[in-house]
Amino acid sequence: MQLFSRVKNVLVADDEKDTCLYLKRYLERRNLKVTPAFDGVEAKKFIEEGHFDFFVLDCSMPKLTGLELIEVARQRNPGAKIALLSAFPSITEAVVKRLGGDIFLHKPIQLSDLDSIFKEG
């Protein structure tokens, strides 16, 4: 995985509120501005209203999944990187890349996985 040291604005979308807030706290400690979204519909609204350098999207959210949000995120933020999260073994890095994501993270998230993506800077 590459390091994304120029990332400043991040959208974290996960319907598991604890996971979303955990990621938010972790990323804010790295001096990033983080917008949390607790479902796909809320995430889409934030994507349409703002600019983000990086997206962390849960693959499996009700109403709108992270996989469905990839296209909207790419249209509104063409240079942004997208990480997709999933606990399901059927979702793989190859699937994520084929659908337009950049990074795949298995749930439960390990801080070492995030450390390999973001460096303080």
Image: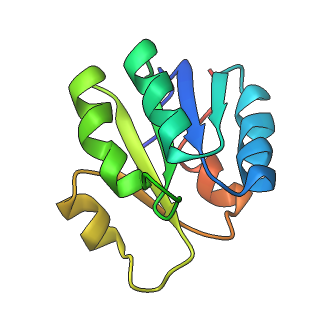
Q: Is residue 116 above or below residue 25?
A: below
Instruction: Where is residue 37? Give x, y as percent.
Output: 62, 37
Q: Is residue 94 above or below residue 115?
A: below
Q: Is residue 89 above or below residue 81?
A: below
Which residue is located at x 30 percent, y 44 percent?
A: 70
Which residue is located at x 39 percent, y 85 percent?
A: 90
Residue in the foreground of this view, choosing between 14 and 33: 14
89 horizontally vs 87: left or right:
left
Instruction: Where is residue 118? Give x, y as percent.
Output: 57, 38
- Residue ranking furthest to the top: 50
- Residue ranking furthest to the front: 63
Observer able to see residue 104: yes
Give the quarter of the figure containing the C terminus: top right
Instruction: Where is residue 91? Give x, y as percent.
Output: 39, 76
Residue in the foreground of this view, choosing between 79 and 13: 13
Residue in the foreground of this view, choosing between 49 and 113: 49
Q: Is residue 74 above or below residue 112?
A: above
100 horizontally vs 70: left or right:
left
Instruction: Please tell me in which quadrant of the rendered image residue 96 appears.
Output: bottom left
Observer able to see residue 78: no
Instruction: Please tell me in which quadrant of the rendered image residue 95 appears.
Output: bottom left
Instruction: Where is residue 87? Give x, y as percent.
Output: 57, 76
Which residue is located at x 25 percent, y 33 percent?
A: 74
